[in-house]
Image (spheres, rainbow, N blue to C red):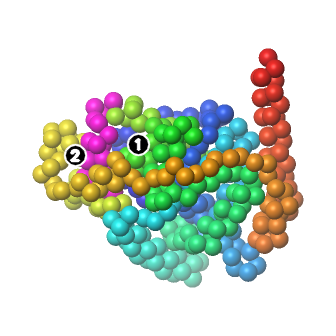
């Protein structure tokens, strides 16, 4: 969910080809939830195998990662660890919202209203531990590195970039810039044509790049002040923020040095400025293990063997071309 800074944050639309040669630290949970929400059957039901096991997340993870590699992008997935205690209220509230959406989904489906059913179904996704485990197994078989953060995945992804071990962070949430990510990419895992909820209209969703320093300069704020703006609006650590305050009003308050009048938020500010992160990670890209990928996706989760093999071929072809190009570059 994150904080809603979209109204005041400057963004630049880019083509995914602009990211060729870049390594991207991706907020894994954020991406997987996007896949679970978007990749569904016509009535809104998640993709499943014959055992009833959900496969939407694996479909998105595999084919989107194939696209990244084909575009010359090196993905590094960063998984959440234990959430900060201040986030528990948000987690509980999300569970309530999902349960309400589930009831509305069941009702709409029983009435045969597929449009309503699909709308509410997208709000019901739960990422269970076995789904996280299967995602990590798939990434390992594909030769794609992943990192487990000690706490927030976005904070760890930002830390990896700040360490110089990745070029960019990727997430739908603006929290990444609050955690200090120098450059954030949005819409990376969901780019393409998307249907507008409740309408028979489709829009092109393209990647957006957000330069943290450009944002701070354009708003004439320090990073701490931007965090204060976010707190007034509402973050995962203080859901709801201050009643009646939106992005523009929050900006005005902070610029006029009135933030302190709305309460004590030192603990939240510290969570953003000094998040729990780790340097104990290893980023190593390897060749895909075809047999292992087929075993996971086809044998266990009943994906089309033909489609998966084509995906693997696309990875191998892209890696061969990359290797040849590097050899030529070294030669010349």
The image quadrant that residue 251 belongs to is top left
CA neighbours of label 2 inside 10 A, class few (<14), some (14 to 19), many (20+): some
Residue 292 position within the rendered picture, expressed as x and y whole percent measured from the top left? 81, 62
Crowding at mark 1 (Cα within 10 Å: few <14, some 14-19, many 20+):
many
In the rendered image, residue 226 lying in the magenta stretch gets the answer yes
Mark 1–mark 2 distance (CA, rounded to whole Å): 23 Å
* Relative to 43, residue 270 above or below: above
Mark 1 vs mark 2: which is more N-terminal? 1
Q: Quadrant of the N terminus?
A: bottom left
Q: Between 178 and 162, which is closer to the camera in this rendering?
A: 162
Q: Residue at x 56, y 69 (%)?
A: 127
Q: Which residues are magenta?
A: 217-235
Residue 128 x, y percent position in the rendering: 57, 73
The answer to whether one can see residue 38 in this image is no
| Residue ID for mark 1 | 180
Q: Is residue 216 visible?
A: yes
Which residue occupies 43% across, 74% down? 95
Q: Main secondary structure of the magenta part?
A: helix
What residue sits right under mark 2 in the picture?
A: 249
Q: Which label sits in the foreground, 1 or 2?
A: 1
Residue sitting nearer the eye, 33 or 326: 326
């Amino acid at each position: 969910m994150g904080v809603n800074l979209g109204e005041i944050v400057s963004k630049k639309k880019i083509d995914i080809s602009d990211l060729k040669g870049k390594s991207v630290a991706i907020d894994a949970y954020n991406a997987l939830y996007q896949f679970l929400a978007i990749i569904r059957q016509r009535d809104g039901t998640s993709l499943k195998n014959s055992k009833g096991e959900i496969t939407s997340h694996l479909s998105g993870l595999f084919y989107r990662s194939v696209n990244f590699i084909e575009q010359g992008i090196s993905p590094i997935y960063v998984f959440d660890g234990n959430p900060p205690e201040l986030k528990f209220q948000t987690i509980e509230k999300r569970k309530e919202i999902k349960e309400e959406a589930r009831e509305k989904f069941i009702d709409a489906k029983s009435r045969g209203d597929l449009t309503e059913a699909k709308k509410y179904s997208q709000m019901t996704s739960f990422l269970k531990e076995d789904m996280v485990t299967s995602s990590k197994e798939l990434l390992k078989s594909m030769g794609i590195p992943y990192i487990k953060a000690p706490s927030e995945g976005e904070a760890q992804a930002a830390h990896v970039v700040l360490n110089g071990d990745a070029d960019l962070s990727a997430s739908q949430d603006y929290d990444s810039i609050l955690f200090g990510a120098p450059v954030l990419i949005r819409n990376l895992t969901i780019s393409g044509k998307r249907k507008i909820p409740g309408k028979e209209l489709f829009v092109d969703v393209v990647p957006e790049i957000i330069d943290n320093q450009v944002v701070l300069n354009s708003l004439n704020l320090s990073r701490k002040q931007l965090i204060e703006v976010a707190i007034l609006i509402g973050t995962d650590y203080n859901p709801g923020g201050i009643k009646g305050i939106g992005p523009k009003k929050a900006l005005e308050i902070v610029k006029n040095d009135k933030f302190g009048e709305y309460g004590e938020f030192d603990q939240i500010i510290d969570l953003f400025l000094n998040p729990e992160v780790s340097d104990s990670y290893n980023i190593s890209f390897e060749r895909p293990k075809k047999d292992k990928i087929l075993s996971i996706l086809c044998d266990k989760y009943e994906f089309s063997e033909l489609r998966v093999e084509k995906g693997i071929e696309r990875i191998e072809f892209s890696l061969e071309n990359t290797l040849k190009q590097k050899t030529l570059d070294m030669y010349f």
